[in-house]
Image (cartoon, helix red, strand yellow):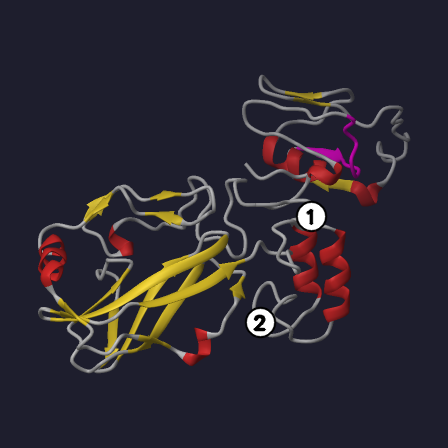
Amino acid sequence: MRYTKLPILLVAFAVLALPMSVGAVSSTSYQIYPEQGFQAPAADGYANTDDMLNSTSYQLQGAIEPYSDNPTSTSYQSQIGGAFQFYCGDGFRDTGETCDGADLNSATCASQGFDSGTLSCSSACAYVTTSCTTAGGGGGGGGGGGGAAVGSLDEPEVSDEIADLDFTYVSPFLLYGTMDEDTEELTVDGESDDVEFTDDDAWKVSVSLSYGLNSFTLVAIDGSTESDETIYEVYRRLIGDVNQDDTVNDYDLSKLVGLWGGSSRSGDFNEDDSVDDYDFSMLVARWGTSV
């Protein structure tokens, strides 16, 4: 469940349609008290009408951070202060995450190009397809490649648009480029199921990046002939990690300020060609996180 420090959101989620009482608002799974020392004026019954949340069945007064502890129940957990942040592993897909915990964005093995199996999510918030299976055909292609001649077919090339890309902040990543027109099959790390030929000499494949350096081996195949290997590498940074030290802290904030208003990719966490307040909010949301 997503953590929140706003008690109004917590109450709205937990106590829909419960009547307001003078003391504690209670149920079998939680108990919420108004601020200590709160006295309701006789005029309207509440100290500050601007802070009230209303519905047809209750009226509650809220305030920022009224909790001095970390109250829990079987249905929610509320944290306050610096503990509030988004990060990989919180069970919710944030910007740049393919999945998070059980949240697979409705993806399945079938949507990833497999016939059956169980899709899962890694600790780096990327799809894990090791339990996905493909019926027939796939294994035979791999066996035929074992005795293939090497070097007489041009190796596949990565597009110039991403060839010199040192890093990215996203996990779903489109790898694409060109190939010899005689290529019948192109493998990425030994697999060809997800590779699409977009033209006689063009290919593409969507891959999931883990945090850190990602390396992919590309090979073109024509019958019994294999090309030389093409190695493509790209580094996935944690969102907010401007200086690529795998931690989001004050140093990243100071560098982001220097990039403000420009289009530097180092500070453009959502990769929209602009370093602005949206990128700042993404950094703040991940403050103190590391991979």
Horizontal arrangement in the rendering, residue 178 relative to residue 67 (left or right) = left
Residue 16, visible in the rendered structure: no
Could you tell me which quadrant the C terminus lies in?
top right
Badge nearest the viewer, 2 or 1: 1
**Does 219 appear above or below 118?**
below
Q: Which mark is residue 287?
A: 1
Asked where in the image residue 121 lies, by quadrant, the reply is: top left
Q: Residue at x 70, y 52 (%)?
A: 284
Asked where in the image residue 152 lies, by quadrant, the reply is: bottom left
Q: Is residue 271 magenta?
A: no
User: How many other residues sit within 10 Å of disc 2, few (<14), some (14-19) or many (≥20)?
Assistant: few
What is the count of numbered marks? 2
| SS for callout 1 | loop
Q: Which amino acid does the dot numbered 1 rest on?
A: Trp
Magenta region, residue range: 58-68
Q: Is residue 59 magenta?
A: yes
Residue 235, visible in the rendered structure: yes
Q: Which amino acid does the dot numbered 2 rest on?
A: Asp
Could you tell me which quadrant the N terminus lies in?
top right
